[in-house]
Image (spheres, rainbow, N blue to C red):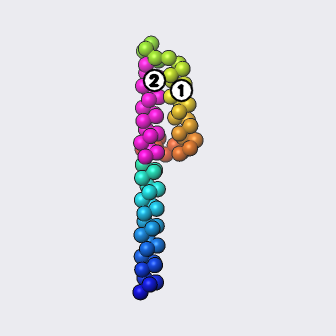
Amino acid sequence: MAGFLDRAKEQAQQALQQGKEKVEEVQAQRAGGELLKKLGAAYYAERRGSGTAQATQEALSALEAHIATHGDGFLRG
């Protein structure tokens, strides 16, 4: 009986870890999407004359840092 409970506990812990990893992945994808949106808005504002090249560069740098950390999987979705 103890072996069964140990296996059940191990499976539950694995499922919990997988759930945490999925949540982190979804959060990273959302953050990447927001950074991409900010870059687009900064670029649009710059092209219309109400934004600056510096703001666009800062948005691009933030997006590139996110990609370096989390990958670019959010770009495919």
Q: Which residues are magenta?
A: 27-45
The amino acid sitting under disc 1 is Glu
User: Is residue 75 or residue 33 the one in the foreground?
Assistant: 33
Residue 30 in the image: state x and y as whole percent: 42, 42
Residue 5 falls in image quadrant: bottom left
Split into 4 quadrants, where in the image is the C terminus? top left
Q: Residue furthest bottom?
A: 1
Read off the residue under disc 1: 58
Q: Residue furthest front?
A: 2
Answer whether residue 35 is magenta in the image.
yes
Given contact means CB atoms under 8 Å apart, are the residues at marks 1 and 2 in contact?
Answer: yes
Split into 4 quadrants, where in the image is the N terminus? bottom left
Answer whether residue 18 is magenta in the image.
no
Q: Residue at x 42, y 52 (%)?
A: 23
Q: Residue at x 52, y 43 (%)?
A: 72
Name the element at disc 1.
helix
Q: Residue at x 56, y 37 (%)?
A: 65
Residue 17 in the image: state x and y as whole percent: 46, 62
Residue 42 numbered mark, or none: 2
Numbered disc total: 2
The amino acid sitting under disc 2 is Ala
Discs 1/2, front: 1
Graded by Cα atoms within 10 Å as few (under 14), some (14 to 19) or many (20 or more), the crowding at tag 2 reads many
Q: Earlier in the sequence, mark 1 or mark 2?
A: 2
Q: Residue at x 45, y 51 (%)?
A: 24
Q: Is residue 76 visible?
A: no
Q: Main secondary structure of the magenta part?
A: helix
Q: CA distance from mark 1 to mark 2?
A: 9 Å
Residue 40 numbered mark, or none: none
